[in-house]
Image (cartoon, rainbow, N blue to C red):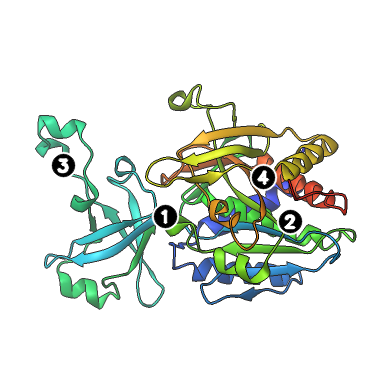
Amino acid sequence: MPSKKEIDSINTTLEELVLISGLSGYENNVRSYLIKKLKTKSLKSTTDILGNLICTLKGDDNLPSVILFAHMDQIGFIVKKIEDNGFIRVERLGGIPEKAIASQDIVIVNNKNELIKGIIGNKSHHATLQDEKYTVTPIKNIYIDAGFKNKRDVIKSGINIGSPVTYAPYYKTLSNNNVCGSSIDDRAGCAVILDVASSLTKIKKRPTVHVVFSVQEEFNLRGILPVINSLKPDIAIQVDLTLTSDTPDMNNSSDILLGRGPCFSLFSFHGRGTLNGVIPHPSIVEIFEKAAKTKKINLQRSVASGILTDASYVQFANNGIATIDIGFPMRYSHSSREVCNLDDLINLKNLILGAIGKIDNKLKLIR
């Protein structure tokens, strides 16, 4: 059972991360925060050209090297047109479903890195026709109302074509150590591996671990690839959400429950236009199962279609990389109010530490 101190610590970190707007390709503020946090833990980091943040913790060179990564970016929009009357049209960036958009609070990041508040317009109910009540507004008809009178006012505020837009940063605590936020995906993963990085410095017998906060996962799932090609790790551990099945709309989709522990994926496949996914390396699966048993952590097992992570592309890099997707249960993915459990995050951290500690010279990566 995680202690109150552990819960309070990760809750603070997660809140601070969620309250930063960081669209894919515009992760600068998230990265700056993480650099400062690493420095407080006396950990050095570097940044590549794309913006990936890399913290290498040297270990035994005779052991397989590990990359542990989670993505910094979040879904949102890009400004594509400014109407003469001051309303703003946008293009979707990442997997935002139309049904989750109407009436949402948003922020636009201007050229001074200021957050300009706005809302997604929604046709007044009293003017809505009967057949419109049961339809979702397509993205091409979505517009932002930020209170501007005209196009000149918008430009004067520092907003222009290409300005990034995200859900308005939001975070609150719920009952039973559950929390709700606008970008739990994947700031919760970032909070976890940040804690792992700090804890790894206290473990002497372990492999070299590259802890990486990656970019552009929500855009094209390939932002991590330059790091993979540069570092050439033997093992890749990707940390992200796992869909729960414990809400009325998700019954019978899986056995993943919020608050019941971290998860690992035995199969993921994205069949909607992208024939890709991850079948984890059996040796790494075994390591995580043994670590869960040793640490007495309940490890939930996931098989899912319609979901994809950047681990899908990582596993095929270089000569092939032994890869696994692990994560935390999360509700309401890609909405403005995602929910996870802090106990799950602490147990996920401990599971990762336990698994890394079990990587030795007896590990066979060749099938």
Secondary structure at numbered mark 3:
loop
Secondary structure at numbered mark 4:
helix
Say which label, 1 or 4, has the lower sequence index: 1
Q: Amino acid at mark 2?
A: Val
Residue 125 image offset from top left, x and y in percent: 16, 37
Say which label, 3 or 2, has the lower sequence index: 3
Q: Residue at 77% x, 39% y: name it.
A: 286
Question: Can I make out residue 301 in this image?
Answer: yes
| Mark closer to the observer (4, 3) | 4
Secondary structure at numbered mark 1:
loop
Distance Cα–Cα, label 3 vs label 2 = 48 Å
Q: Residue at 60% x, 29% y: name it.
A: 257
Distance Cα–Cα, label 2 vs label 4 = 11 Å
Q: Quadrant of residue 316?
A: bottom right
Secondary structure at numbered mark 2:
helix
Residue 122 image offset from top left, x and y in percent: 21, 45
Residue 46 image offset from top left, x and y in percent: 64, 76
Residue on which disc 4 sits: 345
Q: Amino acid at mark 3?
A: Ser
Q: Residue at 20% x, 66% y: name it.
A: 81
Residue on which disc 3 sits: 124
Q: Amino acid at mark 1?
A: Ile
Q: Amino acid at mark 4?
A: Leu
